Image (cartoon, grey):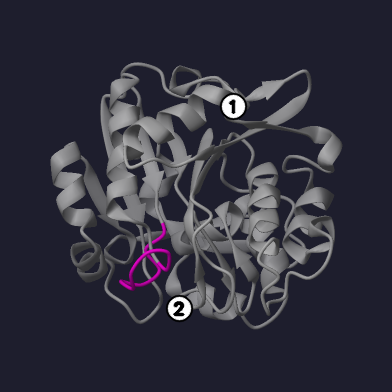
């Protein structure tokens, strides 16, 4: 595995933004190349775990576009990864195995030679959240204790309870289902971040070609920014993602400075990544 913070330059977290073309594989590569390239995240022979968004089997952007996951996986294999696994658990009442089949992710995994880990079919193990104030411990899928190199592949959308879903919220899918229900009872946004602090993704590639700007997570008003973002820092990429959502001036809960949103504010307190715009260098394609 490479450095846990490979995408930093002059003390700033790098975030790229590119306009997606019909060639998703090339567009994703361009986004990651702008911050330093897949070679900074992937060591030949690595096992790489991809975390998509498969909360439901509703169509993209409610859930990950299987073609995006495939294009990301191809780039990871091109960088020399030996093996890919995709780990996920859908919402509490859904079968992840069924959702994966319905959205085409199962076929993608077969083409990539990847394993899919349906977490609700696996044992869970208790873990402590070192800096947890609202979430001191939880249960995560036992296979996640040995995931190799972690790459997140979030969608971008508003969320009726957490205001927005991006990279930090994505990791809630790795908790057991009982804990997820409890999590929503109070301080959800802060708990999202405390859970995210347990994991250490090396790379995040965000699919913002289509987004929800109202509602979410399963349905909402769809807009099409047509953008792919890449970063090594969850906070930096989530901040830039929220700003994309804010440009549509929709009726949602994002009408404030992004750094004042509870998820971002808690991430700043925990020093997960960027603490202000001064910590971020946004690179856009020319």
Q: Is residue 203 magenta?
A: no
Residue 77 coordinates in the image, percent (x, y): 28, 26
Residue 226 coordinates in the image, percent (x, y): 48, 50
Q: Which residues are magenta?
A: 53-62
Q: Is residue 55 magenta?
A: yes
Q: Which mark is residue 219?
A: 2
Is residue 166 shown above or below 57?
Answer: above
Q: Residue at x 61, y 52 (%)?
A: 196
Residue 64 sits in which quadrant?
A: bottom left
Q: Nearer the viewer, residue 171 or 156?
A: 156
Q: Residue at x 36, y 72 (%)?
A: 56
Left or right of 135 in this view: 142: left
Dot 1: few (<14), some (14–19), or many (≥20) neighbours within 10 Å? few
Question: Could you say whether the residue bearing mark 2 is in a helix, strand or loop?
Answer: loop
Q: Residue at x 70, y 55 (%)?
A: 243
Residue 170 coordinates in the image, percent (x, y): 51, 58
**Which image quadrant: the C terminus?**
top right
Foreground disc of the pair 1, 2: 1
Residue assigned mark 1? 286
Q: Nearer the viewer, residue 284 or 242?
A: 284
């Amino acid at each position: 595995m490479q450095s846990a913070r490979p995408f930093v330059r002059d003390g700033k977290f790098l975030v790229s933004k590119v306009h997606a073309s019909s060639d998703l594989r090339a567009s994703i590569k361009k986004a990651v190349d702008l911050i330093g390239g897949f070679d900074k995240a992937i060591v030949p022979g690595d096992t790489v775990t991809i975390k998509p968004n498969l909360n439901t089997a509703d169509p993209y952007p409610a859930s990950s576009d299987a073609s995006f996951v495939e294009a990301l996986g191809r780039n990871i294999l091109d960088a020399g990864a030996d093996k890919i696994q995709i780990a996920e658990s859908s919402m509490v009442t859904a079968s992840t195995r069924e959702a994966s089949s319905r959205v085409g992710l199962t076929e993608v995994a077969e083409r990539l030679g990847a394993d899919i880990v349906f977490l609700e079919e696996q044992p869970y193990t208790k873990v402590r959240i070192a800096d947890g104030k609202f979430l001191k411990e939880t249960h995560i899928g036992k296979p996640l204790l040995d995931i190799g190199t972690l790459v997140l592949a979030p969608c971008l959308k508003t969320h009726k309870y957490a205001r927005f879903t991006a990279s930090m919220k994505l990791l809630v899918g790795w908790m057991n289902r009982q804990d997820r229900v409890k999590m929503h009872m109070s301080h959800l946004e802060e708990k999202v971040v405390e859970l995210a602090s347990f994991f250490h993704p090396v790379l995040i590639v965000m699919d913002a070609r289509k987004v929800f700007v109202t509602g979410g997570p399963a349905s909402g008003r769809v807009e099409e920014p047509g953008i792919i973002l890449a970063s090594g820092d969850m906070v930096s990429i989530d901040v830039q993602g929220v700003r994309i959502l804010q440009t549509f001036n929709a009726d949602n809960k994002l009408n404030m400075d992004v750094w004042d949103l509870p998820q971002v504010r808690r991430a700043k307190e925990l020093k997960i990544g960027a603490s202000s715009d001064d910590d971020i260098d946004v690179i856009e394609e020319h």
